[in-house]
Amino acid sequence: MPGARSASKPCGPLRCWRSATASFSWRTARWWCRVVERLAADARAYVLLARMWIRVSMSYRTSFVILTVGQFLISGLDFVAILVMFTNIDALGGFSLSEIAFLYGGSTLCLGLADLILGNIERLGRRIRLGTLDAMMVRPVSVYVQMCADEFALRRLGRITQGGLVFAWSVHALDIDWTAARLAMVPYLLVFGTAIFLAIFTMGAAVQFWTADSSELANAFTYGGSTLAQFPMTIYPTEAIKALTFAVPITFVNWYPSLFILDRQDPLGLPGAVQFGGPVVAALLAVLAAAVWRTGVRHYRSTGS
C-alpha cells in the first residue's frame, strides 16, 4: 500500500538529507583514518631514527656520560643561584623557596622534554644554508619528522633529571593539602606545558625557511621563556605578565596550573577557568605551528648547492 511504503521508506528531502549525512559521516571517518595512519607512520619513523642516533651515541659511552653529567650540572647552576638568593631572603614575590622550586622544576621539566623530542629542529637554518635539506625533501618521510629526530641527543636527559629532582623535592616540601584535583594537575602541567614548548620550538624553526638564520630569536622564546617561567609572575610588571599570557603564552606552561595547586590568586585577576586553559592554548599553538611549518615548506626553494 502507498501509505505503508511511505512510512517504511522516507522519500523526498528527508531521504536526501539522510543520504547526504551518511555520506558526510563516511568521508569524515575516512579522513580521520588517514590522519591517524599518517601520524602512526610518522611516529614509527621518528622512533626508528631516534633509536639509530641513540645507538650511535652509545658507541661512545664515555663521551655520552660526560656530556649528560655536564648538562645536569650546567642546568643545576640556575637552581644553585636561587638557593644562594634564599640565604638572604625568606620569599620572592610572595613565594617561598619550595613554591619557587615547584615553578622552577615544572618549567625545566617541560622545556627539557620538548628539547629532547625535537630540540634539533632549530638546526633547520643551517641545513638550508648548506643545502642538505634538499636530501630530506625527497625521502619518503616527512621533513618535520626527520628534522625532529636528526642527531637525537639522549644527553639532554641531564637537564630533565635535574629538573625532575628539584620538582620531586618541591612536591615533598610544599605544605599543602594534596587533594585528588591537585595531584591530577601535576601531570596536566607537564603534558600541556611540554606541548606548548613543542609548538613554540616548531614555529621558531619554521621562521628559518624565510630568514635561514634566526635560531637565536627562537631561543629567546623557548629557553628565555623557560627562564622567565622559573620565577613567580608577581615579580614582573603587569605589562610583562600580559605579554606572557596573551602574546607568547608561557604562563600556561606552569604558572596557571601552579596557581591552582598552590591556591594562589592570579595577579591579573582573570577568571579561575583560565587556570585550566592549557589544553586550549596548546591546541591553538599546535594548529598555528602546523600552518606556519607547512607554509614554510611550500615556500622553500633549493639553494642549488
Image (cartoon, rainbow, N blue to C red):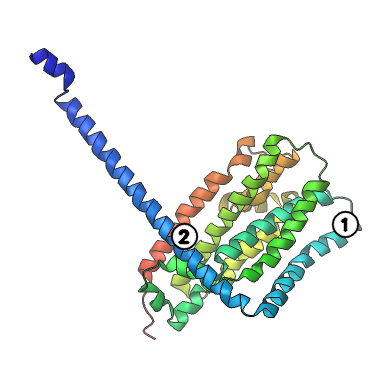
Of tags 1 and 2, the one toward the viewer is 2
Residue 231 seen in the current view: no
| Quadrant in the picture for residue 41 | bottom left
Indicate whether 248 appears above or below 65. above
Indicate whether 175 appears above or below 152. above
| Quadrant in the picture for residue 200 | bottom right
User: Could you tell me how many numbered marks the image carries?
Assistant: 2
Give the class, few, some or many, for how many residues have Cα within 10 Å of label 2's Cα (few <14, many ≥20): few
Q: Position of residue 14 (x, y in %)?
A: 20, 25
Q: In this view, does 218 lie to the left or right of 43?
A: right
- Quadrant where the C terminus sits is bottom left
Disc 1 element = loop
Q: In this view, does 25 lie to the left or right of 146?
A: left
Q: Where is residue 151 in the image (x, y as percent from the top left)?
A: 54, 74
Indicate whether 243 appears above or below 202. above
Tell me the distance, in whole angstroms, between the alpha carbons under discs 1 and 2: 44 Å
Q: Where is residue 299 in the image (x, y as percent from the top left)?
A: 37, 69
Residue 177 seen in the current view: yes
Kind of residue at badge 2: Ala
Kind of residue at badge 1: Phe
Q: In this view, does 93 lie to the left or right of 244?
A: right
Q: Which residue position is annotated with label 1?
A: 86
Q: In this view, does 27 lie to the left or right of 275?
A: left
What's the residue at 64%, 80% (across, down)? 60
Q: Which residue position is annotated with label 2?
A: 43
The answer to whether the residues at label 1 and label 2 have Cβ atoms under 8 Å apart is no
